[in-house]
Structure formats: structure tokens, C-alpha cells
Amino acid sequence: MNKGIVISCFAGLGKTTVAKKYSNVSDFRIFDLQTSAFRRDPNIKLDNYEAQKGFVTNITNPAFPQNYLDALEKARAENDVVLITMSPDIRELLEQRDISYTLVLPEKTDSFREKLVARCKVRGNSESFIIELVRYFDNMSRDQKDYKCKLLIIKENQFLEDLLLEQKFITRAI
């Protein structure tokens, strides 16, 4: 069986939107594998899906990261594309385990940074999440030589779905 392609995307680029859009397609499946529920103590429940992404707690799940890696392998077996976070610790785990992935980062412009911050505020991300997003946005290299994986830069006026189609990760638009 083929394993799904893993695409590690910067926050706010539309992973959840693309996965939802393609959720009912019978011949091609895209899955958005969040890390928050795997990192956090399973007894902590949050109603707001987006707020989970920035939820900070000192109580972590002792099963992490193995629980996430198990879920990733299951998602890869069941889907054509698996969209994941671009967190450095997750990318390091992928590299340690020789799991191939593509990294998608936003073009580095002030207006794109502001657009991403606005998206995160609208969807309910925490202030701490937004501060981290800006820090990563400003400091991450956009140079391929700095990464072991394939690097793609998404333009400010481009949607994630368009980039995935352009790169042939998605074979047809719906």
C-alpha cells in the first residue's frame, strides 16, 4: 500500500480548510493531523478547535510523541496527503525516523505576516500562539539549503490548495 505524502505547513495557511474541502472526495483523501490533542494531557478538554492549537499547559501527555507518530502512520496509510504542523520538534522526529516530508512556508512580507496574524485572531488562536507565529515568521529561513526536506514558499496571494495542485500533490481541484 502507498503511504500518504506528508506536508508540513506554517500556521494559518489553510491546512484545516483544504482537508475539510476534500473530506468527502471518495478517490482522493487529505487529512489534517493536529498535534495539540496528542501533546496535551488527554483529560483536558477544550471546545474551541482553533484554541486547542495555542493551548499552553504544564501537563503534557506522557505518550507524546509516540502517540502522534502512531497517528501519523495511520493517517499516511489511509490518506493520499497528510497535512501537519511545521513545529521544529515534529519535523525533527520525522527526520530522525526517515519520514519524507515537504515544508511549506509563507513568503516573507510584512503584509503576509499581518494577514496570518489576522486569520489567527479571527479563528480564535491564543495570544501566545500568535506571538510564536510572528517569531517563526520573522526568523525562519526561506532558503532550501537550510532544510533537509523539500521547501516550498507560498505567495501571499496564493491559496494552499493552489500550491498543492501546482506541485501535483493534489491531482484535481474540487
Image (tube, rainbow, N blue to C red):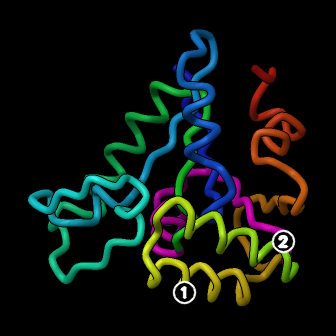
Residue lying at the far top in this picture: please name it. 26
Q: Amino acid at mark 2?
A: Gln
Give the x, y percent position of residue 23. Answer: 54, 24
Dot 2: within a 10 Å radius of its alpha carbon, few (fewer than 14), some, or many (20 or more) residues? Answer: few
Q: Amino acid at mark 1?
A: Ile
Quarter where residue 126 is shown: bottom left
In this image, 25 relative to 90: left or right? right
In this image, 114 relative to 57: left or right? right
| Viewer-proximal residue among 142 and 45 | 45
Among numbered discs 1 and 2, the one appearing first in the sequence:
1
Residue lying at the far front in this picture: please name it. 122
Task: Identify whether 15 is placed above or below 117.
Answer: above
The C terminus lies in quadrant: top right
Q: Is residue 104 magenta?
A: yes
In this image, 118 relative to 144: left or right? left
Q: Which residue is mark 1?
A: 131
In what element is the residue under mark 1?
helix
Report the residue at 30% width, 63% height from top.
65
Separation of residues labelled 1 and 2 (CA atoms): 25 Å
Give the x, y percent position of residue 48. Answer: 34, 55
Report the residue at 60% width, 28% height from top.
80
Q: Nearer the viewer, mark 1 or mark 2?
A: 1
Q: Which residue is mark 2?
A: 144
The tally of labels here is 2
Dot 1: within a 10 Å radius of its alpha carbon, few (fewer than 14), some, or many (20 or more) residues? Answer: few
In what element is the residue under mark 2?
helix
| Viewer-proximal residue among 98 and 155 | 155
Give the residues in magenta.
Answer: 88-108
Task: Identify whether 96 is placed above or below 136.
Answer: above
Q: Is residue 24 magenta?
A: no
